[in-house]
Amino acid sequence: MAKNFSSREEDYSKWYNDLVIKAGLAENSAVRGCMVIKPYGYAIWEKMQRALDDMFKATGHQNAYFPLFIPKSFFSKEAAHVEGFAKECAVVTHYRLKNSPDGKGVVVDEEARLEEELIIRPTSETIIWDTYRNWIQSYRDLPLLVNQWANVVRWEMRTRLFLRTAEFLWQEGHTAHATRDEAIAETEQMLRVYATFAEQWMALPVLQGIKSPNERFAGAVETYCIEALMQDGKALQAGTSHFLGQNFARAFDVKFLNKSNELEHVWATSWGVSTRLMGALVMAHSDDNGLVLPPKLAPLQVVIVPIYKKVEQLDEIAVVARSIMDDLRARGISVKFDDDDSQKPGWKFNEYEFKGVPVRLAIGPRDIENGTVEVARRDTLEKEVLQLTDIGHKIQHLLENIQDNLYQKALTFRDASTHKADSWQEFNDILDQRGGFVLAHWDGSPETEQLIKEETKATIRLIPLNAREEKGVCIRTGKPSERRVVFARAY
Amino acid sequence: MAKNFSSREEDYSKWYNDLVIKAGLAENSAVRGCMVIKPYGYAIWEKMQRALDDMFKATGHQNAYFPLFIPKSFFSKEAAHVEGFAKECAVVTHYRLKNSPDGKGVVVDEEARLEEELIIRPTSETIIWDTYRNWIQSYRDLPLLVNQWANVVRWEMRTRLFLRTAEFLWQEGHTAHATRDEAIAETEQMLRVYATFAEQWMALPVLQGIKSPNERFAGAVETYCIEALMQDGKALQAGTSHFLGQNFARAFDVKFLNKSNELEHVWATSWGVSTRLMGALVMAHSDDNGLVLPPKLAPLQVVIVPIYKKVEQLDEIAVVARSIMDDLRARGISVKFDDDDSQKPGWKFNEYEFKGVPVRLAIGPRDIENGTVEVARRDTLEKEVLQLTDIGHKIQHLLENIQDNLYQKALTFRDASTHKADSWQEFNDILDQRGGFVLAHWDGSPETEQLIKEETKATIRLIPLNAREEKGVCIRTGKPSERRVVFARAY
């Protein structure tokens, strides 16, 4: 199984798709553009959810749940938002089916037409701010720090598993504040939470910055984002945090009495990450042998494979395996002893390698004699034989080491794939020959950004937070620029 | 706040609705029939989810995620299912909006009409069995034990918060098995899981049994259920587990090679509980002073309120409070010290009572002198002064005691509200005067059940598992009957 798929070199895009399907992460469904997230993929997503949810709660947020449906008219209330979101979306027009007159199946009952169409939420700012109007009266009701885990739908024409699907799972935080500064602080705090999650859990180094106006969320005053680099040199936006100003409060008439007893519009943020992170995780670390998962997100962290000819040998191995399992589980490490006798060890080795299990232990009769175990790590594919003494501690340490190593490897790759370009020629050469992030001067105009995008397919991924001031000239127009921004071709 | 809502006696239905809204559990949204689950309500639902999810995993199930949309034609594949589910549902007919020609807002783009309409899932058997066709080839792929946490939509005309809403949250397990016996064992196992959850977590005694054909899930061979009794004497179906036979495997052509190398249709189960449980929780235990929550599901289990005049007193109280909090948290008990000085203790007492916090501690200057704390329990409203010595252990014990007491109280109520009826007159008298469960003989025919429902609004809630054989005559028709079944008016 492990080798029966494309290599990254041959066809990166096919490699990704094959891997996601064959490793049992997700597959396409009967509904165009909608995926099925399979148990192994969902188990990773659950680990992501748990870690993120804990971080949201640690920063004072509570979960809630808002309706799937949004009345069509809500989209028109915020001028920029309607342009961005009320286009490619799923529209509910009827609420009943009836038996078909020809007796075959069911048809839409035209008498059950909704007075106002309902849109399946592509994002929930509108319905949430319509709700907040009743929740907020005074400064005592603020800040309101709410998150929701939900499914959303954006009708995409070209879809790819996890990266771009019509329906996807995500979390969306929606907060309300008494002051502009507090809302900006929240926006920035949640960007840091995302960056911490990407780096410490996904082992994925990310750049932090703000979007250019062209790439800004529809309805936001400022969009902050984290951007990661995939192994093919393309960038991937891994999370966004929006400062919404008073735009939605104005659109939905949400005011509060401040401490001076004056009515003011409320300040807002929203922020989200989605199952897209699953795609980023796969593309950042996996290799031609299959998945590579950072230990902190691996559904199974350690597998033990017995090597034996006779049943008595298996019995002896099982005793050692159970003792190792007890030790590991006491350390909060997930472990499985695979004594299924219908498969050979070699098949199992391939299978667990393909599934990205971070550490594989093999125990044979000679190990029993010597008090040893063979330890293989998935990230480097290195093997070594270790004494059983203190084995739980050694494996715990190894898992931490693998987590670090994956991060360092991704960081080294990103650094080696980040280049400065000081001319249009150089900019194009880097994009075509090496890919990666390109640091270049830009004159700050949306028109130039659009031009560059049309000519090179590269977009401004972000303007780095605290970007160093550096005078220069725009690579495309030669007009003056104050700082470099980060360009890349992106997912 | 606490008293500013209807009593159960006055208007049970209004009491319920007021309580759900004023305690911050849920409210109606701008979309007809769809609720907003507010943070306090969602925190309870999260606790329910976590406990259930742990139980599902402990019984070998994995989570996955299937599409929100189901192609309309899928509903017609299983003859009984289409009758039950392809009627009142949300239908997506278009995938794009466009700017209105009159410049005001957006309208549906008629050019973006779907070739086949998509139905928002009312339940997912069809899309899941369509998927399972590709997952199952041989007996080695079985059993397949999958659960999904999701939102579903059933277009209800009359809705009530949590109890009946157009969109609701639930989990739906969908399993596939090689044999009929194994599938039935799974159906029964999951019923027991639900009963255990209801009794041990929700403190809600439930009857276990099977549904009569009239009340069976559309497409099931047998529907098992748990039924609980609410304080107004009405029954509430709290969970169902369905043995689906080979119905969906036939409809979606899901076959497997058995050990004898023969192709067979797969055997199926499905089972679910929903946010309806939130309604059951409120209606089972709460009182005219507000919510009463079983400690195991209370978002906040203990609150500490300081009683003081001078700041120095608060400082002393805070020292004691912190020590209690450390002790309780080490025991896994959630606790809050409410030192907000903008509210008086009496207001706080009312507030936490209203919110159903199981235990309230009050500490004043005299307690500091005496080394005591005043402990109030929400279930009985009793107060006592306890020595601080060993206070963590005492409170832990008290929480267990409250959990038990709520269960016992509900059980006593149910037992007192369960009556045998041996004549039509008696049956009607009990329903009209006392409500509750009525054990009565029924001739086993759907027509009689329908007749009884029309005449009394009571339905057969279940035929108890292992119901004792007892010869008798049907209360309505006088025809012979082999056992009593359980009738009630129900939510």
Image (spheres, coloured by chain):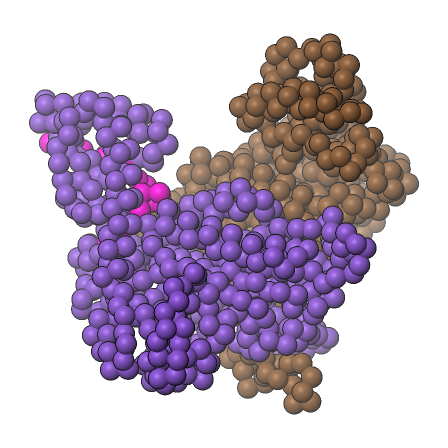
Chain colours: A purple, B brown
Q: Is residue A437 above or below residue B40?
A: below
Q: Is residue A21 above or below residue B314?
A: below
**Where does residue A225 sit, x and y in percent of width and height?**
45, 62
Question: Which image quarter: residue B225?
Answer: top right
The residue lying toward the viewer, choosing from A487 and B124, is A487
Does residue B354 appear anywhere in the picture?
no
Identity of the residue furthest to the right in this view:
B10
Is residue A300 shown in magenta? yes
Q: Left of A448 or right of it: where is B203?
A: right
Identity of the residue furthest to the front in this view:
A471
Q: Left of B179 or right of it: where is B482?
A: right
The residue lying toward the viewer, choosing from B271 and A330, is A330
Q: Residue at x 50, y 42 (%)?
A: A54
Q: How many marks?
A: 0
Q: Residue at x 37, y 59 (%)?
A: A207
| Magenta stretch in the rendered image | A290-310
**Where does residue A157 sit, x and y in percent of width and height?**
44, 76
Looking at the figure, which quarter contains the N terminus of chain B?
Answer: top right
The residue lying toward the viewer, choosing from A45 and B198, is A45
**Where does residue A6 sit, x and y in percent of width and height?**
20, 64
**Where does residue B94 sit, x and y in percent of width and height?**
57, 77
Question: Which image quarter: residue B82?
Answer: bottom right
Tell me which secondary structure the magenta stretch mostly adopts: loop
Identity of the residue furthest to the bottom in this view:
B101
The residue lying toward the viewer, choosing from B368 and A432, is B368
